[in-house]
Image: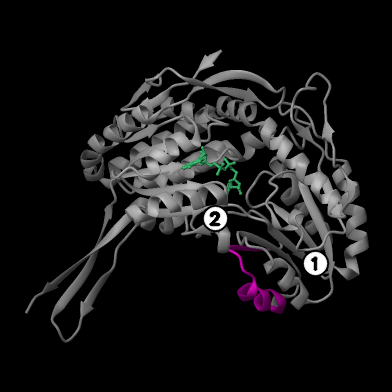
Amino acid sequence: MIHLSNYINGELRAPIKKDYLDVYDPSCGEIYAKAPSSTVEDVEAAIKSAEKAFPAWSLTSLEERSKILLRISDLIESRLEELAKAESKDNGKPLWLAKAVDIPRAASNFRFFSQAITQFASESHQTTGRSAINYTLREALGVVACISPWNLPLYLFTWKIAPALAAGNTVVAKPSEVTPMTAYLLSEICNEAGLPAGVLNILHGLGPTIGNSLNVHPTIKAISFTGSTRVGAEISRQAAPLFKKLSLEMGGKNPNIIFDDCNYEKMLETTLRSSFINQGQICLCGSRIYVQEGIYESFIEDFVERTRQMQVGPPALESSRLGAVVSEAHFNKVMSYIALAKEEGGRILTGGHAIQPEGFEKGWYIAPTIIEGLDNNCRTNQEEIFGPVVSVMPFKTEEEAIALANGTSYGLATTLWTEKLSRVHRLAPRLQTGILWVNTWMLRDLRTPFGGVKNSGVGREGGFEALRFFTQSKNVCIQYD
Ligand code: NAD
């Protein structure tokens, strides 16, 4: 049994109280590793180490910081196979997906921010009539916390850590206790890359225990969090009175709006992906599918048929389009939403049941599920399920589509399918969403602002937005006459 360690002051350390949590392989439902169940004493040690490392790291030249981050990126790339296997085993996602998306993106995160920081400039203003010049210094905040979820473990963990380090902060980072493995491997990589001791500290353990200690610790100047809206609200409640900077990337209930003038084949192929990839466990997955009445019937027929062809199976098999969902608790949550959808009057067009692949009967597999006939306001259409479950509804007009799409408390991502340019421009300003994809889905450019509106998020990550979040500005005003 592998015992993972915390990463504190450049060392792989056992938790002070020697308590461990079980880590499961979702493909077979078995425990395969133990991760530290860290306590407040470990949090203190990590924060002390980050505090000690801050002065030197924040004064390290941009070129040197950039070089180290680039080395981390290269090492992630060179260990692609091993990291992808670890991610797939830990999370249940297909190995091909971890190899194609999760791990390459983790490498890109470090590569992108190693370059972005060298291009990050501040403003200068000539104050005419007063003979003064104002310029802005952007300074690192100090010790910051990065807290991430289980659905894209290394991808999202590094999405926060890379800009925080690039901007000159030192970090205490907490991966999800459900998927700690690749964060642990990152500790080894950071040492190999020559990241100075204490610049990054990685703590494993339960959300409330470690999280609450970070949320209220006076040394932590900012918290970048990705996870559920419930926990985001809890972090705000605890951290706001201490005036910490907060960036909260939270849940979604994303609409796909499909007009009957769309490029049908492309839309169908992409909608299969946006509904079910990663077992529907991506915050950006579309879970409410609104289809204009002219193509509604044919869409239902084709979408159901193509969904039935998607194989659900062990993550290591190349043929598995879907693997296992992440945990037994999550499996039960998703299944309970399918039961709720039936109670609410939904018709299950396909799926709606668990799957037991041969030899993996104890794994947590769910058939991709399509539901029809639900009201927009029912719980199934209002609450985040975060599994391979979508609900399809017809609409007639643009006005109706806008009202349906905006009709939840969330506002993360929206996908719009139409070939009419004027329609895109009419709808874009009226949709309550942080990201609008038109005739595509999850096409990411790391320079763009990323985040949600309403209960999906506060603040933006990505590009210079992330570097702005992880720095504070200081205005210097000089009168020269
Ligand atoms: P979660 O909120 O349960 O946990 C996220 C992280 O917060 C974990 O590391 C957890 O240990 C930690 N945590 C728990 N309690 C805490 C507390 N009191 N203080 C501080 N940290 C605490 O989320 P999850 O179940 O791991 O992930 C799924 C959720 O993440 C979904 O809601 C999904 O939409 C969301 N998500 C959002 C985005 C986005 O970019 N908006 C991306 C991916 C996932």
Q: Looking at the image, can residue 440 be seen?
A: no
- N-term-proximal mark, 2 vs 1: 1
Magenta segment boundaries in residue numbering: 422-437
In front of the other: 130 or 327: 327
Q: How crowded is mark 2: few (under 14 residues within 10 Å), some or many (20 or more)?
A: few
Q: Residue 445 carries which label?
A: 2
Residue drawn at (75%, 78%) of the image: 399
Label 1, residues with CA under 10 Å away: few <14, some 14-19, many ≥20? some
Res 427 quadrant in image: bottom right
Q: Name the residue under label 1.
A: 262
Q: Which residue lies furthest to the bottom in this view?
A: 129
Q: x and y percent of residue 384 in the render?
A: 67, 51
Magenta-span inclusion, residue 413: no
In percent of the image, x 45 and y 45: which residue is there? 160
- Amino acid marked by disc 1: Cys
Quarter of the image holding residue 58?
top left
